[in-house]
Image (cartoon, rainbow, N blue to C red):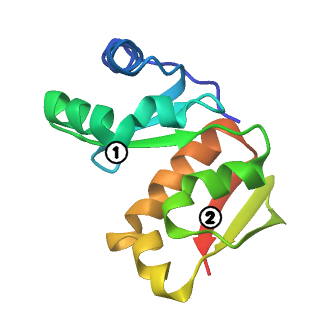
Amino acid sequence: MAEITLDTETLGYIRLFEERTGARVKDCLHAEDKLVFLVFPGEVHKAVGPGGVLVDRLKGMLKKEIQVVEYAEDPEALVKNIFYWYGPKQVDLVPKGKGRHATVTVDPAWKARAIGKAGKNLKVARAILVRHTDVGSVSVA
């Protein structure tokens, strides 16, 4: 796990997000041209708002894509939360180097989307996992 330091800009995003949504943010990172907000367990619905209205408003204000992920202490649960929209069926964690590698299994129809253009979603997932777990790499099966 990396020690997390947040710059002034990121702290500003967190403050704005918390003020606008009422959800508590554990972490915020810029990854692949979007802002990823890691919110405390049970706070996703508060953060997103009815029908996604709060996130849509923030997207408009910040002119950035926003992804909200529910934090979980357990690496397997965190991987499932990151890939929530792609219906993760299972997560396998195997030792790799000093840490672990996560393979998340999704419905074959969603596999390409889960990976993202040029592996964009995998990069976002890895950025979150490296900051909060011993998982250093991730793949989609």
Q: Quadrant of residue 8?
A: top left
**Residue at horizontal 42%, vertical 80%?**
112
- Compare marks 2 and 1 and give the one earlier in the sequence: 1
| Depth check, front residue: 97 or 31 | 31
**Residue at horizontal 42%, vertical 16%?**
18
Secondary structure of the residue carrying numbered label 2: strand
Report which residue position mark 1 lands on: 51
Side of 45 relative to 4 (left or right): left
Q: Amino acid at mark 2?
A: Val
Report which residue position mark 2 lands on: 138
**Residue at horizontal 68%, vertical 48%?**
78
Image location (x, y in percent) of residue 49: 38, 34
Is residue 35 visible in this depiction of the protein?
A: no
Are there few (<14), some (14-19), or many (20+) residues within 10 Å of tag 1?
few
Give how far apart the Cα atoms at labels 2 and 1 are.
Answer: 30 Å
Image location (x, y in percent) of residue 74: 79, 44
Image location (x, y in percent) of residue 102: 71, 64
**Residue at horizontal 77%, vertical 37%?**
73
| Depth check, front residue: 17 or 36 | 17
Q: Amino acid at mark 1?
A: Gly
The N terminus lies in which quarter of the figure? top right
Q: Confirm or deny contact between disc 2 and disc 1 (CB under 8 A).
A: no
Secondary structure of the residue carrying numbered label 1: helix
Is residue 98 visible in this depiction of the protein?
A: yes
As drawn, 34 above or below 38: below
Image location (x, y in percent) of residue 23: 49, 22
